[in-house]
Image (cartoon, rainbow, N blue to C red):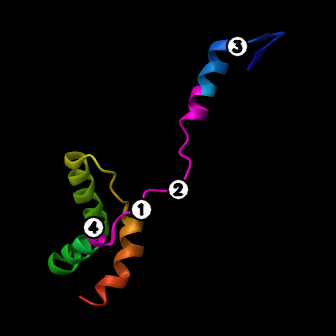
Amino acid sequence: MKIGDKYNWPRYNEALVKRGEEERGRPFSYPNNFIKVFALLRVVFRIPYRQLEGIAKSLGKVLGNPAPDYTTFFVRTFQYESRL
């Protein structure tokens, strides 16, 4: 950040802005029924988890909601797939 005895203020300000963009707080919690629907899709159509993530992202863009990643699907659907 320092250039000789002077500060590089534009670079310092950019670093402050980037620091404020970090994600903090509790992660988004997905409802059980939402996960159950995707677990059902996975079992019925034998869709891999990464493809489920793609479907969820496409649906999330339309509905304006965040989509879980494939690891979230794996962890959360494991309990439902044994019952289906």
Q: CA distance from mark 4 to mark 1?
A: 10 Å
> Image point 52% across, 56% down: which residue?
26
Q: Quadrant of the N terminus?
A: top right
- Asked if residue 75 lies left or right of residue 15, the reply is left
Q: Earlier in the sequence, mark 2 or mark 3?
A: 3
Label 3 secondary element: loop
Q: List x then y, in percent, for residue 78.
A: 37, 81
Q: The residue under label 1 is which amino acid type? A: Ser
Name the residue tied to disc 2: 26
Q: Label 1's element? A: loop
| In-image side of 80 versus 42 (left or right) | right
Residues in magenta, as a range: 17-35
The residue that disc 3 covers is 8
Name which of mark 1 and mark 3 comes first in the sequence. 3
The residue wearing badge 1 is 29
Choose top left, top right, bottom left or bottom right for residue 56. bottom left
